[in-house]
Amino acid sequence: KVLSGEARVNSVFPFLCKLNDEKEVDRPELWELANPMLSEPRNEYSQGLYDTIYEEYEDLADDPSNREEFMTKRMNLPVTDLERSVAKWEEIAATDQPLPDLEGKEAIGCIDFAQIRDFASVGLVFKHDGKVPFITHSFTRKEFVDKYYGYSMKRVDSKEKFAPIKEWESKGLLTVLNEEMINLEHIVNWFVTMRMKYSIKKVIGDNYRMEMLKPLLEAVGFEVEVIRRPEAIHGLLAPRVEMYFAKGMFIWGDNPLMRWYTNNVLVTIKKDGNKIYGKKEPIRRKTDGFQALVCGLYRFEELSEEGIDDALDALEALNF
């Protein structure tokens, strides 16, 4: 805030030390840009620190998985390791495009929740004008967000900054429930409400989550598909997900919660080269919204870009 002029200086001197470019990491004489203590002449402590950093740098040749941590900790220049993250942050941020008018359009419904005691995400995936719009909503328990994100604290602390639940709630992106567990009726009712506006072909979720939900959704008329081996579709869909991000095809609207979910995903590459989408941290860094999107993309090619009104117009134009 001081640097942007939003707050008065008030005896604060912001002193930022970092590399100017990622490529400079290969020039040890420039490391002092990130840590002035490494400047010549070095005292005994500074030389020891330099030697430690140099050893860590050399180790990257044999273990490049530490590069992300090294660039952040030692060079003060966070970088995105695309072998560990879904996409570059710039590509995730590019999803902030206005959602088009999708009323009457076909959609694939999707669901993900790790446990019914913390978060659950629902969504609709569309195919529209060469883009992939995604509408999503999340449910969470008050007790959980109180404990891990400081939701009920009157003053914002570091936990609330980590995941600003109140802000996302005010945007209508999630619903905080004061329940012992997330009532599955909230999920079913969301899809019933969405069906009034969109044409939902089917609802998809993985085997671990759909056992209880499948009969409830079928009871209100939805076709439900269960993915038996969810990790298997990650490797199948990873190239498509990467392409959609690279080409700016995802449209999520102004949805910081969905961007947070996506940035929390840890990509693991198996011995066979296939990718698995996991979590960078098991409890606080949720990925439910992104995992729901992946489920929806599994049947993305079944979607038509035409809506109900378009189909009716086409029928009326036929001369029988």
Image: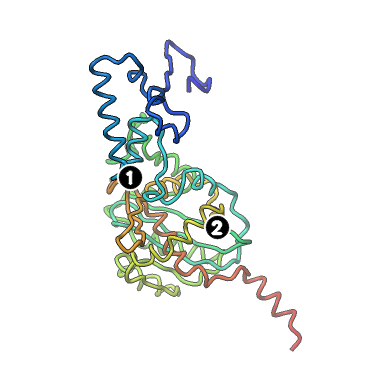
Viewer-nearest residue: 49 or 250: 49
Q: Residue at x 41, y 59 (%)?
A: 292
Quadrant hosting residue 228: bottom left
Q: Which residue is disc 2 drawn over?
A: 133
Identify the image's colour scheme: rainbow, by chain, secondary structure or one colour.
rainbow
Residue 240 screen position, x and y as percent: 48, 61
Graded by Cα atoms within 10 Å as few (under 14), some (14 to 19) or many (20 or more), the crowding at tag 2 reads: many
Q: Which quarter of the image is occupied by the C terminus? A: bottom right
Quadrant hosting residue 61: top left
Q: Residue at x 54, y 46 (%)?
A: 94
Viewer-nearest residue: 288 or 297: 297
On the picture, is 126 further left or further right than 181? right
Residue 43 screen position, x and y as percent: 26, 14
Tell me: residue 89, above or below residue 304.
Answer: above
Graded by Cα atoms within 10 Å as few (under 14), some (14 to 19) or many (20 or more), the crowding at tag 1 reads: few
Query: Helix, strand, or loop for circle 2?
Result: strand
Residue type, numbered disc 1: Pro
Viewer-nearest residue: 68 or 254: 68
Mark 1–mark 2 CB contact (< 8 Å) = no
Tell me: residue 35, above or below residue 25.
Answer: above
Q: Residue at x 26, y 24 (%)?
A: 49
The label nearer to you, 1 versus 2, is 1
Residue 30 screen position, x and y as percent: 41, 25
Task: Determine the CA span between mark 1 and mark 2.
Answer: 35 Å
Q: Which residue is disc 1 drawn over?
A: 64
Residue type, numbered disc 2: Pro
Tell me: residue 206, above or below residue 288.
Answer: below
Residue furthest to the top in view is 11
Query: Helix, strand, or loop for circle 1?
Result: helix
Q: Which sits earlier in the primary sequence, circle 1 or circle 2? A: 1
Residue 144 screen position, x and y as percent: 29, 46
Residue furthest to the bottom in view is 320
